[in-house]
Amino acid sequence: MRKNQLGSSDLFVSEIGLGCMSLGTDKEAAMKLVNQALEHGVNFFDTADLYDDGLNETIVGEAIRSRRQDVVLATKVGNRRVPGQEGWVWDPSKAYIKDSVKGSLRRLQTDYIDLYQLHGGTLDDPIDETIEAFEELKQEGLIRYYGISSIRPNVIREYAKRSNMVSVMSQYSILDRRPEEEVLPLLAEKGISLIARGPVAKGILTGNGSAKADKGYLDYSKDEAIHVREQLLELDLQGRSLSQAAIRYALSPPAVAIAIPGASSFEQLRLNVEAGNAEPLSDSELEAIRSISRANRYEQHR
């Protein structure tokens, strides 16, 4: 599988990563899927301390323990659980970040994290303090690089201007083209990579996604989502499946280093890996896809 440099870092990531949130809590099945991904050339694994209250990190850590040197390991921080309360609160403070990394390292059974990501962010955050926390963790050798996971252009812009982040994780697909207007040009200019999550749009852009389209997607109504899906299926995709074309679309901008579709079964993983091994979309194919889909706009999440 092709590998791309992640921003200005010395990390080279497989074009297809594994979004580990979809692994579930069956430890044996999840560990098996992680190892199958490794065997098929996937080297980027993305988790978060929030997923399954830390259990996801624990499972991933145990699964990769014997092959840590082969893995680019990413996790996230910023959502703090409050004992005795449902849910979590947002906490991007330096103190919380520097304390939380200890728990992630313990659960992941490693002494360093390749990519530590802020799991959200707003303009009201103490951004300089947050950046300082990540920089200190780098100096201490606990993390190698850092990035943010955000869909807010203004937040992304501030971190791109004020920090040494190497990546931004953001939702990006044929049905969610919001990063194209503001985010991707900025990241390309700054030498920062986009990690594209949700490239198959919650399964709508897969072979069996017709039922999923019934719920609509973002600003696409049910009827619009079904219509776009049908039009995409009518395109000449040069032997690619719809999911392969969707993943290749998300990988097409130069600023995108990696796509991380989820997988909860080997069949889904296999299809994702096949997309990574497929030929990139041609300019004419990209144009045909864009003529069918909508150039979405950011609204409440600016």
Image: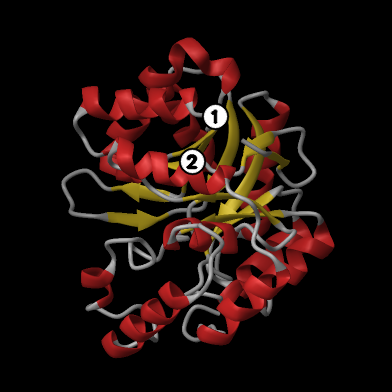
Tag of residue 273: 2
* Residue under the point 48% across and 53% down: 119
Q: Position of residue 229 (x, y in %)?
A: 38, 77
Question: Looking at the picture, which amino acid does disc 2 mark?
Answer: Val
Q: Position of residue 52 (x, y in %)?
A: 26, 41
- Depth order, front residue of 265/13: 265
Do the residues bearing badges 2 and 1 touch, measured as CB atoms within 8 Å? yes
Quadrant of the rendered structure where residue 140 is?
Answer: top right
* Residue under the point 76% across and 71% down: 185
For marks 2 and 1 on the same chain, the one whose residue lies earlier in the sequence: 1
Within 10 Å of disc 1 (Cα), the crowding (few <14, some 14-19, many 20+) is: many
Task: Decide: is 148 above or below 57.
Answer: below
- Depth order, front residue of 96/109: 109
Residue 100 seen in render: yes
Within 10 Å of disc 2 (Cα), the crowding (few <14, some 14-19, many 20+) is: many
SS at mark 2 in the image = helix
Question: Looking at the picture, which amino acid does disc 1 mark?
Answer: Gly
Q: Position of residue 61 (x, y in %)?
A: 40, 22
- Depth order, front residue of 152/93: 152
Quickly name the residue at label 1. Answer: 41
Tag of residue 213: none
Q: CA distance from mark 2 to mark 1?
A: 8 Å
Labels in figure, total: 2
In the displayed structure, does residue 64 sit left or right of residue 160? left
Quadrant in which the N terminus appears: top right
SS at mark 1 in the image = loop
Q: Position of residue 21 (x, y in %)?
A: 34, 44
- Depth order, front residue of 179/74: 179
Quadrant in which the C terminus appears: bottom right
Task: Decide: is 159 above or below 215.
Answer: above
